[in-house]
Image (cartoon, helix red, strand yellow):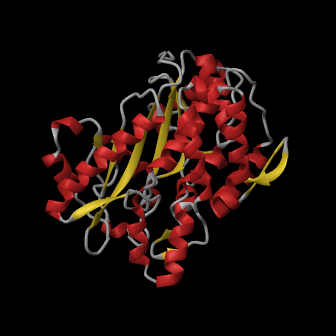
Amino acid sequence: MIFRSSKPFTVGAELEVQLIDRETFALSNSSELIFKNISDRFKGIIQPEVLTSMVEIVSPVCETPGEVVEHFRQSLVHIDEIGEKYGFRSCALGTHSFAKKEETSITVKERYLRLLQELQILLRQFLIYGLHIHVGFPDSASAVRGYNMAINYLPVFLALSTSSPFFYGEYTGLHSYRTKIFEQLPRAGIPEYFDSFAQFEELFNRLKEGGFIESIKDIWWDVRLHPDLGTVELRVCDSNPEMDRIELIISLFQGLSLLAQEEKPERHFHQILKQNKWNATRYSVSGRFIDSSGLTTIRKKTYSIIKDLEKKGIWDELKIGDRMKSLKNVLKRRPVSEKMVIVYKKTQDIKVVETLGFVR
């Protein structure tokens, strides 16, 4: 397996968004209308996804997180311009709040149909939407270090993004129900640490030789090595409508990836990793976080990471030091999931909850 070198610590991301009816806020199977009317400028950036009621926005390779979110903003504006004519619009939440699987249809594409054959009802109820982030690495060894570092902070990335407390019209009591749906899949969830790229290759080859996977796209870990692109890909996050929040998440992933080249990542018991992730799933940034430094909250841990990377000069090295001074203020706000719960408890209207996914 060849790890294709990419420019170190460049970033890119993919944002999965719902297409919803402008009046009822129900899912709208309208992706075909987008691709019939799409401007040449956005071809290849706005792409089809597994359901016809969603699309994926794929940024090009960028130097800074700010560039990535600008691609998202412009693409979302274009989707909504098309949707204004046909009665739908975009919505960036981790789940649709009240849709049922019977109301959706699978995009007719060989890969998706193959997955449907394998996953059955699990794929049909996949009314979930994520944010995937790539950081570039020059070689496989540096990528493994970045990957191992990211494993430790999956709860931080998840907690910052939580936006899926409702599913099938019910308040789940969780901040990220999308996470629990996704974990039902084989080859999903928190992966294991690797000592080397060769160790990853051995696992990959065993799965492929057994006929369980065809490519890296069939491995759905919360973070994964992506040799074809020369990146490490973070996949744990809910989709999110707050662009500065997405920028903060990308910045943290980029910064920790660089830190991993200077400091050897710690390794924790898998049960500790699972507990921390559950705390993020259940309580978002208010959840508790445990590591070798002791017990704290995820919000406080995030502040600590930002401060530590600032002291080490990471933000300045990435040329985003000034931007981070304002981005850290995102932590003072409630996560989107908490805002959704507050609105629901006040209005008892599950449809209104969907409006919190309109991009801001």
Task: Please provide percent x and percent y for residue 65.
Answer: 47, 36
Side of 104 relative to 5 (left or right): left
Side of 151 relative to 40 (left or right): right
Q: Look at the image and tell me whether residue 235 can be seen.
A: no
* Foreground pick, 78 / 27: 78
User: Where, by quadrant of the figure, is residue 99 drawn?
Assistant: bottom left
Q: Look at the image and tell me whether residue 353 can be seen.
A: yes
Q: How many marks?
A: 0
Task: Please provide percent x and percent y for residue 44.
Answer: 26, 35
Q: Decide: is 137 above or below 217.
A: above
Task: Please provide percent x and percent y for residue 357.
Answer: 41, 62
Picture quarter with the C terminus: bottom left
* Foreground pick, 171 / 125: 171
* Foreground pick, 300 / 144: 300
Query: For the point 61% across and 67% down, which residue is it?
Result: 174
Q: Decide: is 342 above or below 200.
A: below
Query: For the point 36% across and 31% down, which residue is it?
Result: 60
Query: For the point 59% across and 51% down, which residue is it?
Result: 329
* Foreground pick, 356 / 96: 356
Query: For the point 47% across and 42% down, which residue is it?
Result: 132
User: Where, by quadrant of the figure, is residue 221 drawn?
Assistant: top right
Task: Please provide percent x and percent y for residue 78.
Answer: 23, 49
